[in-house]
Amino acid sequence: MSTINIQILADTLNISKSTVSKALRDSHEISKETKKKVKELAAKMNYSPNPYASSLRKKKSRTIAVVMPEIADSFFSLAINGIQSVAEKKGYHVLIYLSHEKYTNEKKILGEVRNGRVDGILISISKETKNEEPIDKILAAGVPVVFFDRELESVHTASVTTNDYECGYVAAKLLLQKGCRRLLFISHSASLPICKKREAGFRMALLDAGCPEKKGQVIYGTDNEKSNYQLIKKSLAAKQRPDAILASVEKIAIQVYIAAQELGLKIPEELKVLAFSNLETAPILNPSLTTVTQPAFEIGKSAATILFKGIEKKHFRLENERVIIPSVLIERRSTSI
C-alpha cells in the first residue's frame, strides 16, 4: 500500500508541491478555487499529513526502534548486539521498547513511533499478538518494518527467523534415540508462531517414530513463573511422569532443573532435558544443558541489514526478503545415556 503524499496530489492536479502545501494550510496566496480542488482531492485520496514531515524533509531522524517482548532472555540480548553492530556503522541510534508479552503494550509503542519519530522498526511480536493492523498502519505510513525471530505471517514485509519446525523435530528425535518414551514438550505459548512450529516438529518426530499420541504430551505455560514451576513439578511428580522434557524457552529449562532437584530426580539418568536456549551458562550447569542454540546475533544483524536497505533504497521491496538462518543442536550431559 503506497502512502499518499503532497507530491502525488501535486502531480494529479498538475500543480507545484508548494501550491498544494499552501492550499492545505489555507494560505491567502492561493485562490479559493485551487484550495477547493486540492482539499477535495486530499479527502478523496485519504491524504493524512505527517506531523513530522517538515522537520524531516531534509534529514532523517537517524533512529530505529526495536520492539521486543523482553530483554532478560539471552536470545534478545544477543540479537540487540547484532542490531547495534549494523546501526553503529550507519550512524544510527537504537531505541529499545519492551512489550512484556502484552499486545496492548506493543500496540501503544507502535502508535508512538509512527509518523516520523523513527526511520524504521525491527519487531519481535508478543505472545498475544494476532492483529496485524498496527503494523500495517506503520507500513502504510512509509516506515519500513522487519520482523526478527517472532513474526506475524499475515503481514507482508521482511522477516529473519530460524528453522523452528525442523529444530523441534530434531530435538524430539534425539530424545527418542536416547531411549526416552514419555516425552513432554513445555511450550511458552499455544498461539505464538515459533512455539507452534516447534510443537509441530516435536509431534511429527513422535509420529514418524510410531509413538502413540499419549506418549508425547504438550503443556502450555503462562506469564506467571510460580504457576509454571508448579505445573512442571506436578508433571514430574505424576505416577506416569515424563522421562524427557523439551522446553520451548530457556527459563522453562531452569525451572525443570530446580523441580527435578527438589523431587530427587537425577538428570540425565531419570530425566533427560533439552531446551531452545542461548544461555551462556548452559555448558556449566550441573549437568550441562543440551540446547537448540539459535543464531541470535546473526538474526539481529541480518534483520538490521535488511531494514537499512528499506530505509536507504526508495524502491526496495521488503516483502521479498524472507531469511531463515538455521539453529544448531548442541548435545551435552543433560541428554547423555
Image (spheres, helix red, strand yellow):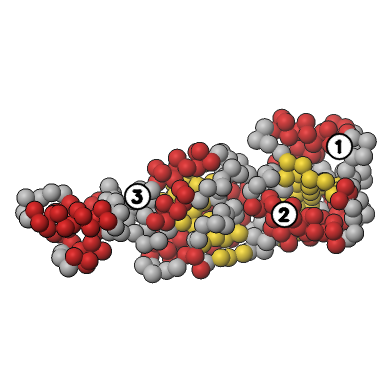
Q: Which residue is drawn at 15% across and 64% down?
A: 16
Q: How far apart are marks 2 and 1 (CA)?
A: 22 Å
- Give the position of the N terminus as an image quadrant: bottom left
Residue under circle 2? 198
Is 161 situated left or right of 183 in this image?
A: left
Say which residue appears at 59% left-offset and 42% top-offset.
128
Label 3, residues with CA under 10 Å away: few <14, some 14-19, many ≥20: some
Q: What residue type is labelled 3?
A: Asn
From the viewer's perspective, is the residue at label 2 or at label 1 nearer? 2
**Identity, as a three-letter code, of the amino acid under mark 2:** Arg
| Residue type for callout 1 | Leu
**What residue does disc 1 label?**
236
Instruction: From the top left corner, tell me how far across and down residue 200 is, in percent.
Output: 74, 55
Seen at 73% across and 41% down, the residue is: 220
Residue 27's x, y, as percent?
10, 50
Q: Are marks 3 and 2 in contact (CB under 8 Å)?
A: no
* Residue pointed to by mark 3: 115
Q: Distance between the residues labelled 3 and 2?
A: 36 Å
- Find residue 161 and report its image quarter: bottom right
- What is the spatial separation of the Cα atoms under label 3 and label 1, in whole angstroms? 51 Å
Q: Which of marks 3 and 2 is nearer the N terminus?
A: 3
Q: Is mark 2 on a helix, strand or loop?
A: helix
- Dot label at residue 21: none
Contact flag, marks 3 and 1 (Cβ < 8 Å): no
Taking the image as shown, residue 114 lies to the left or right of residue 225, namely: left
